[in-house]
């Protein structure tokens, strides 16, 4: 998918708002997105949430 890093982060923020995700997990997800934005553009935000929730 052709999204910028900022677009992926915004999608993540919106997802976190809708699902009432704690701020610390939101920040961890943004770090993961920053490291591999192209990867996370093609993944579900639920997968990212599970990853950061499990501390991996």
Image (spheres, grey):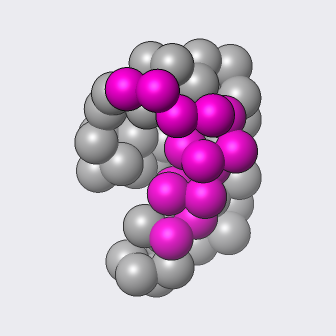
Magenta-drawn stretch, dominant element (helix, strand or loop): helix
Which quarter of the figure has residue 15?
Answer: bottom left
Q: Is residue 36 visible?
A: yes
Nearest the eye: 3 or 38 = 3
Name the residue rendered at 69%, 60% in the picture: 24
The x, y position of residue 11, in whole percent, is 50, 57
**Vertical placement of residue 2 versus 51, above or below:** above
Nearest the eye: 51 or 30 = 30
4 in the magenta segment: yes
Magenta region = 1-14
Q: Is residue 25 visible?
A: no
Which quarter of the figure has residue 36?
Answer: top right
Image position of 41 (left or right of 37): left
**Vertical placement of residue 36 versus 55, above or below:** above
The x, y position of residue 25, in whole percent, is 59, 56
Image position of 35 (left or right of 16): right
Image position of 15 (left or right of 27): left
Nearest the eye: 49 or 54 = 49
Q: In the picture, which quadrant includes the N terminus?
A: top left
Name the residue rendered at 37%, 77% in the picture: 19
């Amino acid at each position: 998918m052709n999204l910028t890093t900022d677009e992926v982060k915004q999608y993540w923020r919106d997802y976190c708002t809708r699902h009432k995700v704690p701020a610390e997990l939101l920040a961890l997800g943004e770090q993961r997105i920053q490291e591999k934005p192209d990867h996370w553009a093609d993944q579900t935000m639920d997968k990212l949430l599970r990853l950061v929730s499990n501390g991996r």
